[in-house]
């Protein structure tokens, strides 16, 4: 079997979209296995930027079937808005298929997300307010509505009525919001139903048949390891598992099917939203890094928090995901610094450790322990071999490899699709 996985090894925004787009031109199928339109994957081709939220990043390759898997939550209105935007730019999505087991993200999920964040005040999670958490909550309390429910209008109507009875009670009585009208929502979904139903497939069956035939299947996650519901900085996490293990649940495949697990690592660290960030730079250097890297959320537009590379975070991703390769991105943004601090551990009230505490109360006390590496001044955006990189840049890459015990197989030196150094073939 030939299953390849691309996951984020930090807090998201590492450049997974670029890596999936690069590999997606050489595979038979690209499968998105979790998350929803809270993702923001950016693909740059010939200087043209395309931002994808719900669609797999391999959608630009019309020769590969693109699948939205069972573990994804699908907002159909966002989906078709994204499809129509690409169509206006001359990109067809006729090769897109959607699992009939994926859950529908409903308008009341978005409303509840906004109301809950507002009510939480200073204790807010910092969600994208796209309804992801409330949708997954319904999935696990077994009152969710799935894409297959759209096939039979009567079944959908029955489930929608039951859901609205519950949700309107919460929206109006707990949060003082405005209730949703059943007939109006039925009309909205009648409009998308005709487009969505023909795209539905038994995704797990199709994916496993492709793997059995030794087709190359690329599994794409959203968010990243430090936002995992189990292993991230809980509760400042996403509502699904964006790890390699999440592929098995979110796409319905065996762990034995996963040959290569590629972790995308940004050469420095960023985070959007609330939660601890040990190497964060709340100074002119952090602002400079944000400006250089264009660090603003592709989904929310919010400025990302910036800091130096935190290697204990990356190492945790290596261990949990079983990374076979690292794809290192945005190393060009570090050009020009005299020296580059890299966090190699934490000082927590006098105790040194290299693992991430479960307790945020404890983690918040952590101070970064830095290893200082010499920087470089040369422009590296035109480099296409490792040997062309300045020696100090090469040493930065090698230090990451040594600390993590995993090969840095790809080094991205600018946002464009072809601006990469391939040290070891990924496919």
Image (cartoon, rainbow, N blue to C red):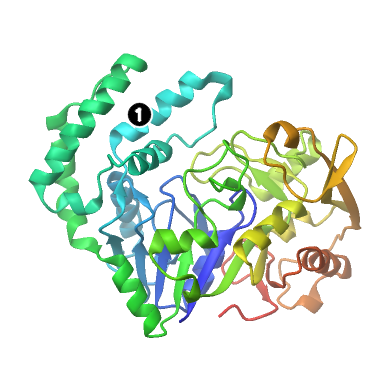
- Compared across the picture, whether 33 is left or right of 167 comes to right
The residue positioned 60% from the left and 40% from the top of the image is: 272
Q: Can you give x and y, in whole percent of width and height, for residue 422 in the image?
A: 67, 77
Q: Which residue is mark 1?
A: 111
Q: Can you give x and y, in whole percent of width and height, for residue 338 in the image?
A: 90, 53
Q: Residues within 10 Å of mark 1 (few under 14, many from 20)?
A: many
Q: Quadrant of the C terminus?
A: bottom right
The residue positioned 38% from the left and 36% from the top of the image is: 134
- Compared across the picture, whether 401 is left or right of 209 comes to right
Looking at the image, residue 82 lies above or below residue 302: below
The residue positioned 43% from the left and 67% from the top of the image is: 58
Farthest residue toward the left?
154
Q: Can you give x and y, in whole percent of width and height, for residue 288 in the image?
A: 75, 42
Looking at the image, residue 229 lies above or below residue 385: above
- Compared across the picture, whether 60 is left or right of 204 comes to right
Q: Is residue 286 visible?
A: yes
Q: Nearer the viewer, residue 96 or 347?
A: 347
Q: Quadrant of residue 259?
A: bottom right
Q: Quadrant of the N terminus?
A: bottom left
Q: Is residue 56 visible?
A: no
Q: Secondary structure at mark 1?
A: helix
Q: Nearer the viewer, residue 140 or 117?
A: 140
- Compared across the picture, whether 343 is left or right of 127 comes to right
Q: Nearer the viewer, residue 252 or 63?
A: 252
Q: Quadrant of residue 320?
A: bottom right
């Amino acid at each position: 079997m030939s299953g390849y996985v691309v996951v984020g090894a930090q807090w998201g925004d590492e450049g997974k979209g670029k890596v999936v787009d690069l590999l997606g031109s050489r595979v038979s199928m690209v499968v998105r296995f979790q998350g929803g339109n809270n993702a923001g994957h950016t693909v740059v081709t010939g200087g043209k930027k395309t931002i994808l939220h719900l669609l797999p990043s391999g959608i630009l390759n019309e020769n590969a079937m693109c699948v939205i898997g069972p573990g994804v939550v699908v907002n159909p209105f966002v989906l078709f808005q994204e499809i129509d935007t690409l169509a206006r730019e001359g990109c067809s999505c006729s090769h897109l298929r959607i699992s009939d087991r994926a859950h529908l993200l409903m308008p009341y999920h978005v409303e509840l997300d906004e109301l809950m964040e507002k009510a939480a005040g200073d204790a807010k999670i910092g969600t994208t307010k796209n309804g992801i958490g409330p949708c997954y909550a319904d999935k696990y309390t077994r009152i969710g509505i799935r894409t297959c429910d759209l096939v039979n209008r009567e079944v959908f109507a029955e489930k929608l009525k039951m859901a609205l009875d519950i949700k309107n009670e919460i929206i109006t009585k707990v949060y003082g919001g405005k209730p949703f009208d059943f007939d109006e929502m039925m009309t909205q979904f009648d409009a998308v139903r005709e487009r969505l139903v023909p795209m539905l497939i038994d995704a797990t069956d199709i994916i496993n048949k492709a793997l059995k035939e030794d087709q190359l299947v690329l599994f794409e996650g959203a968010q990243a390891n430090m936002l995992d519901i189990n292993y991230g900085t809980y509760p400042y996490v996403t509502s699904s598992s964006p790890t390699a293990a999440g592929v098995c649940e979110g796409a319905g495949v065996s762990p034995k099917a996963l040959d290569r697990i590629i972790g995308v690592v940004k050469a420095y660290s960023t985070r959007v939203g609330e939660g601890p960030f040990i190497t964060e730079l709340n100074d002119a250097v952090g602002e400079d890094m944000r400006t250089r890297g264009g660090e603003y959320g592709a989904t929310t537009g919010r400025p990302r928090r910036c800091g130096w590379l935190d290697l204990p975070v990356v190492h945790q991703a290596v261990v949990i995901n079983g990374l076979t390769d690292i794809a290192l991105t945005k190393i060009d943004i570090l050009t020009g610094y005299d020296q580059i601090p890299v966090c190699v551990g934490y000082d927590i009230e006098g105790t040194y450790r290299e693992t991430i505490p479960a307790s945020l109360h404890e983690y918040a006390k952590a101070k970064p322990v830095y290893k200082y590496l010499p920087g470089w001044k040369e422009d590296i955006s035109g480099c296409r071999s490792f040997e062309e990189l300045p020696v100090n840049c090469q040493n930065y890459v090698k230090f990451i490899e040594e600390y993590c015990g995993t090969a840095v197989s790809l080094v991205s030196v600018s946002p464009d699709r072809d601006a990469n150094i391939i040290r070891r073939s990924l496919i």
